[in-house]
Image (spheres, rainbow, N blue to C red):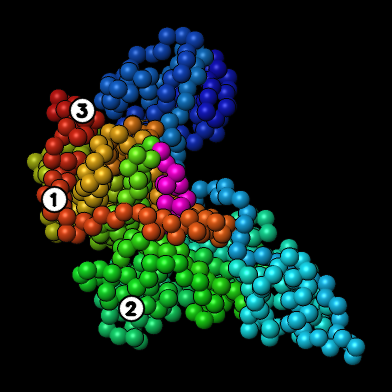
Amino acid sequence: MKIRFEDYNVEGEFEEGVTVLEASRRLGVDLESICGGKGICGKCKVHVVSSMEPIPRVSPAEERLLSRDELDRGVRLACLLRPRGSLVVRVPLWSRRRVQRLQVEGLEVGVPLKPLTRKVLLEIPPASLEDQEPDDDRLLRELERQGYKGVKVSPNALGRLPDSLREGDWRVTAVLFNGEVVEVEPGDTRRELYGAAVDLGSTKIAYYLVDLATGKLVHVESMVNPQREYGEDIMTRMTYTNRGRRELSRLHRAAVEALNELTRRACKAAGIGLNRVYEMVVVGNTVMHHFLHGFTTRYLSLSPYVQAARRPITVDAGRLGVRINPGGKLHTLPTIRSFVGADNVAVCLSAGIFEAEEPTLILDIGTNTEIDFGSGEHGVYATSTPSGPAFEGWATKWGMTASEGAIERASINPYTYEVSYRTIGGEPPRGICGSGFIDLLAELVKCGLIGPRPGFAASRDAERLRRGEKGMEFVVAWADETGVGEDIVVTQEDINELVKAKAAIHAAITLLLDHVGVEESRIERLLLAGAFGSYMDAENAQTIGLLPELDLEKVIPIGNAAGTGARIALLNEDERAKAEEISRKVRFIELATHPKFVREYVNSMYLPYKDLKKYPRTAEILAKLAEK
Ligand code: FES
């Protein structure tokens, strides 16, 4: 019999008795299977499109793990489905295996190539005793002849001009940035034109080296933001810099040195010289933006929370100490408000929020979570909420960033409470990252080990549930299986931190939609930006009330959209103008003073939510649990 995976366009011949999960593995289809095919995690969902023979009956485990709606639509668990005849299936987006990569990815950039930096080859008549015209006049005359009128020459280019003309035997390449010659190089160097797009995150920095002559991405680098030495979260860093100029300059230097280190690494990997990088577009939240420019952040955190600059800024990179070509420029995209920065403008740019006709919600979860809503009918709105570092792997006992050894996916057997998990890189576990915490929280709910309130059900008879130093805790991995020689646990305190973070995000989404006057059910696309959004399990995030309970097909991970937006702005000058427009036109909703915020936050402190009517699928799971 044949089993065909329609959306992968692969099929194979299989013996009777094989499960669809086994077939997927043999065909190289990356179907999720956290429990390893034991029928426990419920993640190996496939959609049966057609079958030659009657499909085997739904098993009790499927009854338990799939919702009524899914069963009605022909969704089955691949590890439990043993077809009797040829079968065609589809793999829903959220059942595809997504392994966290340490590298930062984003959407492919599909914009026309129109960079602000360009190169022009010039053949200049040599000077002689008969023709003693100065070098700059010669250069400008030739540029004018090629159609570049009214061009200025920067001091850097003037300094380089005499030697370059003679070294190149009067054949030079002029580098132009926005109507100004910023560099003159001997010979024809037109093929070597590079720029960098940077997402300067408070936790992680993603660096994209781009070929501006072809538009191709040449190399990606990333590193942990070295400013973390001065505080895990941006509030601590701001408090530090508010002490004085010296402290501010330390944070500024840390950002600049990180940019220099990433440029050095990327250029080395790509085999190009630093002086062939002519431009850098940087996005980051408003605090990162201010640190990079050396602006005080004092007034960002004080009422009425005003940033120093909304407009885009272009400076000589060298003035900030950023080492690229000496004539190179550094550009930061505009900001929106004190806590909605250039990174959010870049996200909106890459997601095309202003062009979105249907109601679209964008969520970028981090220590500070930014939320955007846009539709043709309503316009574009943004808000932000401090959501704490719990999902970033901090403020929890065994929390860690998404790096080697972090538990990134997990499931719990509802009968034996055994835990299946997967770690990044397949290493013995060293801790738990944000996506792992979402799974664990959802699984604990589904097993009835934590209640909606949300406290551990101390009365449950489970070996893994025990009293620790600071109250109840659940053992995720026993000491002998970990890479740290200790039991890795989730404590009640961790759960409180995670629930606070999710409540802040949930309340912000609800109030934003309430302000715009759009029902949650009308959202047609929920775009998850950032690494965390891309790797978490959306269904589990719904189970705990972090995401609205929309049809999963409408929930789309878009990777590092801020980095993608920075690349778009680097590649196309018109998009930079669009970024300016976004920063001016987005309507910002302030939540800090919103009269309903506290009430909504308190209602969101439940798992998934105080009123279960808002979460019918989770209500169904809880009802099934009660029947058990
Ligand atoms: S792999 Fe099928 S339920 Fe876990």
**Secondary structure mainly formed by the magenta segment:** helix
Q: In the rendered structure, find residue 411 and report the number of the disc placed on it.
A: none
Instruction: Report the residue marked by disc 1.
Output: 596
Instruction: Report the residue marked by disc 3.
Output: 620
Query: Vertically, is 478 above or below 131?
Result: above
Q: Position of residue 577 (x, y in %)?
A: 50, 59
**Secondary-structure class at tag 1:** loop
Q: Position of residue 203 (x, y in %)?
A: 38, 64
| Count of numbered circles in the view | 3
Residue shown at 83% from the left, 75% from the top: 124
Stretch of the chain drawn in magenta: 344-357
Q: Residues within 10 Å of mark 2 (few under 14, many from 20)?
A: some
Q: Is residue 353 magenta?
A: yes
Farthest residue to the top: give it: 53
**Secondary-structure class at tag 2:** loop
Residue type, numbered disc 1: Lys
**Secondary-structure class at tag 3:** helix
First in sequence, mark 1 or 2: give its number.
2
Instruction: Report the residue marked by disc 2.
Output: 296
Q: What's the distance in space between the residues labelled 2 and 3, CA to CA?
A: 51 Å
Farthest residue to the left: give it: 459
Residue shown at 50% from the left, 19% from the top: 88
Front label number (2 vs 3): 2
Residue shown at 47% from the left, 70% from the top: 313
Residue 189 visible within the image:
no
Quadrant where ligand 1 appears: top left
Q: What's the distance in space between the residues labelled 1 and 2, CA to CA?
A: 32 Å
Q: What's the distance in space between the residues labelled 1 and 3, CA to CA?
A: 29 Å
* Mark 3 residue CB less than 8 A from any atom of ligand 1: no
